[in-house]
Amino acid sequence: MKNLSKCGVCCSIDCKAYKIECDGCNELEGSVSWAKFYGKILCPIYECAEQNGFLSCKECGKVPCEIWISTRNPVFTDEEFQADIDSRLKNFEELS
């Protein structure tokens, strides 16, 4: 079974920074290095899920939400961003 972050990313498969500059979203409890680019200590997605008592965004039912869109990787093309969203949603479906 995949160990998914709150946003549906499987860090060990989907994240290029995993084990290079990041130990994983869940392991770091959302305190990922790139959160500082949003003026945050925690990933805004992780923080939202925690504040709302969700194990993951899947429980919210509003994905992809404005937070997902506002934390888009700035180097992604529109197609890459859509593929990223699709991958995360598929990861959630596979848990069902």
Image (spheres, helix red, strand yellow):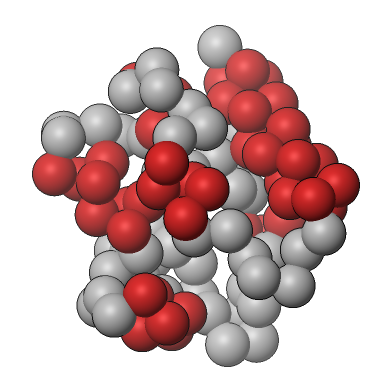
Quarter of the image where the N terminus is located: top right
Tell whether 6 sits left or right of 40. right
Q: What residue sits 26% from the left and 75% below the top?
A: 40
- Give the answer, above or below, for where 90 lies relative to 38: above
Instruction: Find residue 4 and report its horizontal and vertical position in percent.
Output: 53, 44
Tell whether 84 sits left or right of 3. right
Residue found farthest to the bottom: 21
Q: What residue sits 74% from the left and 72% below the top?
A: 75
Q: What residue sits 65% from the left and 86% below the top?
A: 20
- Give the answer, above or below, for where 46 lies relative to 75: above
Q: Which of 44 and 32 lies nearest the eye of the viewer?
A: 44
Q: Which of 37 and 91 lies nearest the eye of the viewer?
A: 37
Tell whether 75 sits left or right of 24. right
Q: Quadrant of residue 73?
A: bottom right
Residue found farthest to the top: 96
All told, the count of numbered labels is 0
Quarter of the image where the C terminus is located: top right
Q: Is residue 5 visible?
A: no
Q: Is residue 6 visible?
A: yes
Instruction: Find residue 66 and report its horizontal and vertical position in percent.
Output: 42, 41
Q: What residue sits 40% from the left and 47% below the top?
A: 67
- Give the answer, above or below, for where 79 lies relative to 55: below
Instruction: Find residue 51 and report its horizontal and vertical position in percent.
Output: 13, 44
